[in-house]
Amino acid sequence: MSNVVLAVVAHPDDEILGCGGALARHVAEGDRVHILILGEGATARDPQRDPQARAVDIERLQQSARRASEILGAEPPEFAGLPDNRFDGMELLDITKRVESVVFELAPGIVYTHFVNDLNIDHRLTHHAVLAACRPMPGRSVRRLLAFEVCSSTELSPSDAPAFRPNHFVAIDGYLQRKLEALSAYDAEMHPFPHVRSPRALEALAQLRGAQVGVVAAEAFELVREIR
């Protein structure tokens, strides 16, 4: 039986960094995979937000996201266009309602999103919005909610906050190359090794997570909630 799978992420490329291998595996197993990207990207590079001045960069990121989704075999991503790295200037309810509308429309059984204690504020608020949008109520579709890690944010979580402790692993032995290929669509966002967001470092992370559970490669998650 196929599932509807939804990844809700803060920025273009988070969906591949955090769960690209798992999404590719879902597609291969016959599931329908959807991606909601909340933030526009790019505009945080300027002192003042100016989406018009960054229109070319925003369009480039969206084209990269579409290409990455195509490589995975997922549906074309949906873009909410929220201000990049400025989610804390919004009412959380407004972010939640944006997520909630997609959850109601798609009725996903499985949802992936950010770890709650990431360094990046957009990641943290995305987690809270998803948690609220997927709260368990009679008739709700979400049966499994998972939080992923994103290099350069998750490992830099504040020292006084609980660290990422994965308790759910997805073997991606046959999908790691697909993940790396999807990341190549975001070539402008990637960096050379030894940067943590280099293809080599991300491959090493997948191998480490795999070795922790006795497989060649894996992605790691915190299981937020599962209903059986």
Image (cartoon, rainbow, N blue to C red):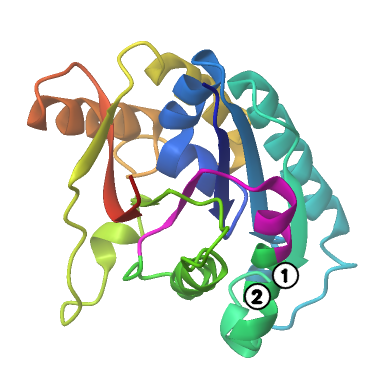
Q: Is 31 above or below relative to 202?
A: above
- 90 horizontally vs 146: left or right: right
Please name whichever residue, 133 or 173, is drawn nearer the observer in this view of the structure.
133
Residue labelled with disc 1: 82
Judge whether 60 appears above or below 125 on screen: above
Q: Nearer the viewer, residue 44 or 28?
A: 28
**Relative to 191, is 39 above or below?**
below
Tell me if label 1 and label 2 are in contact, CB under 8 Å: yes
In the picture, measured across the screen, residue 13 lies left or right of residue 78, that is left
Q: Position of residue 191 (x, y in %)?
A: 45, 40
Find the magenta span and give its range: 101-115
Q: Which mark is residue 176?
A: none
- Corner quadrant of residue 217: top left
Q: Which residue is mark 2?
A: 95
Q: Answer whether residue 106 is magenta in the image.
A: yes
Specify few, some or many for label 1: CA neighbours under 10 Å numbering under 14, 14-19, or 20 or more: some
Q: Residue at x 26, y 28 (%)?
A: 218
**What percent of the width, then of the height, locates residue 164?**
21, 59
Give the mark nearest the N terminus, 1 or 2: 1
